[in-house]
Structure formats: C-alpha cells, structure tokens
Image (cartoon, helix red, strand yellow):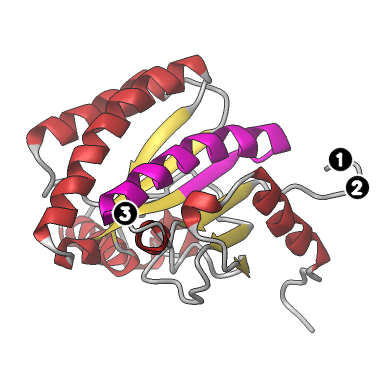
C-alpha cells in the first residue's frame, strides 16, 4: 500500500473481539485465545506504524468484563501482568509511547505500579502512540469527567459558561489524543460496546468477520482501503 495512493488514517481504534471463539474452534481453553490475541496486538502495533498510522487504541478490558467467569478474569489479569512487563521493554525498543485509558483504581497494586511505570518510561517516545483501554467504559469515563468538572465549578475554579466541547474533552481519558478516524471491530459483531462514545462521533466504522487472533497486516490494509472509499463530509449533505 502506497501513501501516495491511499490516505492513511492518523488514528485507528480497534475493538478486539473473538479470542474465545478462536480458541473454541480449536478445542482450546478460552485463555489460549487471549494469549494468541495478545500476540496479535504486539504485531499490529508494528504493522500500524509501518503503514503510517500514528495513533492506535485497543479495547482490551471493559468495565463489563468483570462479569465474566472468575477463572477467565484471573487468567486475563495474569496475562495482563506479563503483557505490561513485556510492553515496558518493547516500548523502549520500538520508541512507542504507551498510555492506559480507563479507571485503574480497582486493579491490584502491582498492576497499577506496572501501568504507571510503563507510562512514565514511554512518555517521551516519539513513535507510535499506543493507547490500551483497561477497565474502560465510555459511560464511566464521561461520568468521571462530569464529576471532575462539577467539583471545579463548586469550588469556583470553573465557570459554567467556560464549558464547551473542547473543554469537556480535556476531562476525558483521551485528553490530547486526536479522535479516531477509523474504528475496526473484529469477529462479526457490529456494536460499540461502550467504547469511546464521545470520541467516535465522526469516525468511520469497519466491521470484519475475522477473529482477532487471525487479524493481520493484510486485514488492516483492507480496513484502510474501506476507509479510503468512504465519502467523508462534515456539516452538510
């Protein structure tokens, strides 16, 4: 794919879906699907940067995922521990700036420490800006933003007439990150599942039946081709 033919979206967001179904098709435990899915994330980060994408945001663990069977949640947390350790090394090697979206307060202390370390060591990196949504839900994000603004208003540090779309965006987890140009959801599902509801207002959506562990650079290119076929117009007909 050549940049002079295709317009590369600056920011791509992905809902990672299908790990469990991928494992079931192979008569493997669900955790095997999550392991395979985490390896796909690593590769897609490299592929995205190679294609010219500057921001990549993935939906890794939602606020609703706590309702899954406890053994699956435990397996996901174990995988997350290892992934965060590996990501610290990988972010340095690949000059990748990593940021975690969501409310990390319910996570175990060692996980929170790893997240803070990862964000700190990678914050000055100038390569791919990689956002991982952990314990994230868009409604929760907006409620936290509203509470923070209400507190500032009550303390006299913020006037009501100062609040506009730009100001509100500054209270979201994605402060300073451009809104996604393209959203990809794998596994055939066609819903947002409480992901970046504010930020996706003008985003193009691409849905594919490919299960997340099978998603690769070729599939990412297909999504970009679809993005380029869209007639993107704003503010009119």
Asked if the residues shown at circle 1 and circle 2 are in contact, with their CB atoms under 8 angstroms apart, the answer is yes
Question: Over which residues does the magenta segment extend?
Answer: 29-57
Q: Nearer the viewer, residue 115 or 29?
A: 29
Residue 223: x and y in percent read: 69, 58
Q: Residue at x 46, y 28 (%)?
A: 97
Q: Earlier in the sequence, mark 3 or mark 2?
A: 2
SS type, badge 1:
loop
How crowded pointer 1 is (Cα within 10 Å; few <14, some 14-19, many 20+) is rated as: few
Chief SS of the magenta region: helix
Residue at image position (42%, 49%) is: 174
Query: In this figure, which residue is indicated by the disc labeled 1?
Result: 2
Q: From the viewer's perspective, is the residue at label 3 or at label 2 nearer? A: 3
Gap between marks 3 and 2 measured at Cα: 42 Å
Residue farthest to the right, as pictured: 4
* Residue that carries the numbered disc 2 in the rendered image: 5
Residue at position x 26%, y 30% in the image: 82
State the image coordinates of residue 10 (x, y, percent, origin top left).
66, 46
The quadrant of the rendering that contains the C terminus is bottom right
The residue wearing badge 3 is 28
Q: Secondary structure at mark 2?
A: loop
Give residue 68's position: percent from left, percent from top.
18, 65
Question: Which of marks 1 and 3 precedes in the sequence?
Answer: 1
Q: Are marks 3 and 2 in contact (CB under 8 Å)?
A: no
- In magenta segment, residue 37: yes
Residue 50 picture quarter: top right
């Amino acid at each position: 794919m050549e940049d002079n033919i295709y317009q590369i979206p600056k920011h791509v967001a992905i809902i990672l879906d299908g790990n469990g179904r991928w494992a079931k098709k192979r008569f493997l435990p669900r955790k095997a699907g999550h392991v395979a899915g985490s390896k796909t994330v690593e590769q897609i980060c490299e592929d995205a940067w190679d294609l010219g994408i500057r921001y990549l945001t993935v939906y890794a663990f939602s606020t609703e995922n706590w309702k899954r069977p406890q053994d699956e949640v435990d397996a996901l947390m174990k995988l997350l521990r290892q992934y965060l350790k590996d990501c610290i090394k990988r972010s340095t090697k690949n000059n990748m700036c990593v940021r975690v979206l969501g409310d990390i307060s319910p996570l175990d202390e060692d996980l929170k420490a790893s997240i803070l370390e990862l964000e700190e060591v990678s914050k000055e990196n100038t390569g791919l800006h990689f956002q991982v949504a952990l314990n994230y839900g868009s409604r929760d994000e907006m409620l936290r933003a509203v509470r923070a603004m209400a507190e500032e208003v009550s303390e006299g540090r913020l006037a009501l007439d100062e609040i506009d779309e730009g100001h509100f965006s500054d209270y979201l987890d994605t402060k300073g990150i451009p809104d996604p140009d393209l959203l990809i959801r794998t596994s055939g599902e066609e819903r947002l599942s409480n992901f970046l509801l504010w930020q996706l207002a003008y985003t193009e959506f691409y849905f594919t039946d490919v299960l997340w562990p099978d998603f690769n650079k070729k599939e990412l290119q297909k999504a970009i081709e679809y993005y380029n076929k869209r007639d993107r117009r704003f503010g009119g007909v």
